[in-house]
Amino acid sequence: MTSHLKHYEPLVQKLFEALELSDAQELALIHPETKKVENPAIAHIADFLKSADKLIICGDYDCDGIASTSLTVLLARKLGLDPGYYIPDRFKEGYGVNVNTIDAAHKKGYTDVLIIDNGVKAHVEIERAQSYGMRVAVVDHHIIEEPLPIEAFLHPDVCEPYAASMCATGLIYCVAETMGLADDYMLSLAALATVADVMPLWGKNREIVRRGTKALNENQFKQFDKIVKRNQYTHYSAKLLAFQLVPKINSVGRMADVANVNTVVQYFTTADDAIINSYSKQLLKLNDFRKEKGKQLQAVAMEKVTDDAIQIITDASFHEGLLGIVANQVASVTQKPTLVLTEYETTFKGSGRSMTHSLQDIFSSINRDYFEAMGGHDFAFGMTIKKEFYAQFVTDVRAVVDTLPPFVQTDTAIVSVDPEDVTHKAMRQLTDFEPYGEAFKLPKVKIPLPTVYGLVNLNGYGFKFTFSDYPIQEAVFFTKQYTRNQLVGRTYMIGELDLSNTRKLSILIEDII
């Protein structure tokens, strides 16, 4: 621990010491920066927008794609443009801009195409647009495989270290900021997408989420407030965005068979209260449907779990938009790489998740001729497998995984904490260091469990300890169920400090030992 944090409460010092922060990171926390990202790539996108005649924005169907499309629409309107936009149907059209969209845009008289949160692989589509004489720009953050011969290109790889690992919405926000046209609502969209795409919360990402959540708390942005059902106790944070907003927005793209993701762009870019009220109700209803459908599919999937080293679960009834969610749930329970697939006439479409071995390494050993499409990273992978190769694919994947060494779990840092150190002042100081998230997470804490406590049932969702004559006032646990008899002899609570509870000193328990 350096001298930068020596004036903070003992709890703060102890937790941050466990994070092994660098001197520069500590300074970034204590003296947070606010600075514009300015470089030639951002200037080129700004010039492209300023000189656009009739602009169409081609986005993606996840939260970052929706938010970046929405922010670009708002920016274009500030420049006096009346932009069009289109996000493809996840099931019928797949990921990214396609030639049919380019053809349709040309027929409607669009002269300028901005592709956002996709585009680095859209060589065919870009060539088609240019053959019509259309100008093309790309704002993307996915892996660049080949250079793009276009008018303007913005990507974290062409930005300074402060703007490393940014999502598409964060990048286009930087353009708006450099142009002097950014506002708090745009900032809030950028914060939402940065959390949704699990970007590391340092540098410009940290600044955007810190300032964006502050803007959400200080303003009443109806598009956000309606989705989280804001009340007097609502406090926007990175965690609230991640758990109460992102899944609901992503549900629209996932459920493309019953919803049109382009309506969410209209929702985020309209000032019409009637539309906001109507769409927010529909969005919440759709998310409830998605959750119920997901529970049903998870139950089916768990019945098919085997003792194999990799879980390959196929069912024709599985909803394509929920494959990743179900795969993640099964992988979490089994702690094994998991592929969940649904069957079509000529293909199997699937999604893989892993908490242990790298899916990238596994799939790199599989014959690419088996696939119509595939891609992803170590812990999430998507695939479309040709039906005639499916049986051999299963055999080969199992053979590869069987050769892998056993996964050794690395213990997450758990810090033993004196309950007397858990004070309102310490919790306020920890809250001041928000946002917490990717690349900056507080360690779990281990705190003694008092021998005397109250135990309250939370309507079947979990239990709450209540304490008297103890610094910590309550502790809530959802993940495991205990009876009083099972708690006999258990002496410690392990979990997270609940920074969202501003009224009481509280812990969110993960285990009791």
Image: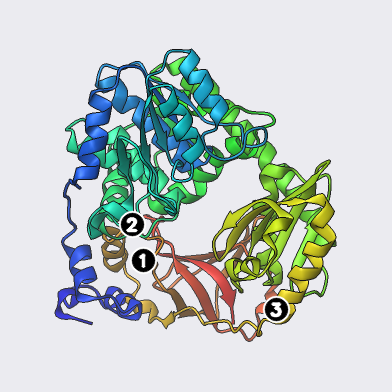
Q: Mark 3, residues whose alpha carbon is within 10 Å: few (<14), some, or many (≥20)?
A: few
Q: Is residue 208 left or right of residue 246?
A: left
Could you say where residue 292 lies in the image, as x and y percent from the top left? 72, 43
Q: Residue type at mark 3: give it.
A: Gln
Q: Is residue 49 above or below residue 109?
A: below
Q: Report the quarter where the C terminus lies.
A: bottom right
Pointer 3 residue: 486
The quarter holding residue 272 reads: top left
Q: Quick check: marks 3 and 1 in contact, CB under 8 Å?
A: no
- Tell me the residue that label 1 is attached to: 440
Distance between mark 3 and mark 2 Cα atoms: 36 Å
Marks 1 & 2, CB-CB < 8 Å contact: yes
The image quarter in which residue 463 lies: bottom right
Please tell me whether mark 3 or mark 2 is closer to you in this view: 2
Whichever of labels 3 and 2 marks the residue nearer the N terminus, that label is 2
Which residue is more in the foreground, 192 or 493? 192
What residue appears at the point 81 percent right and 69 percent down from the top-left corner? 395
Q: Amino acid at mark 2?
A: Pro
The residues tagged by marks 3 and 1 sit, at their Cα atoms, a distance apart of 34 Å
Please tell me how many numbered marks the rendered image carries.
3
Q: Residue 245 at what x, y percent from top left? A: 49, 42
Lateral position of residue 441 relative to residue 373, left or right? left
Secondary structure, mark 3, is helix
Q: Position of residue 252 (x, y in %)?
A: 59, 35
Q: Which residue is mark 2?
A: 435
3 above or below 50?
below
Residue at x 48% of width, y 45% of height: 121
Quadrant of the rendering where the N terminus is positioned: bottom left
How far apart are labels 1 and 2 at the CA level?
8 Å
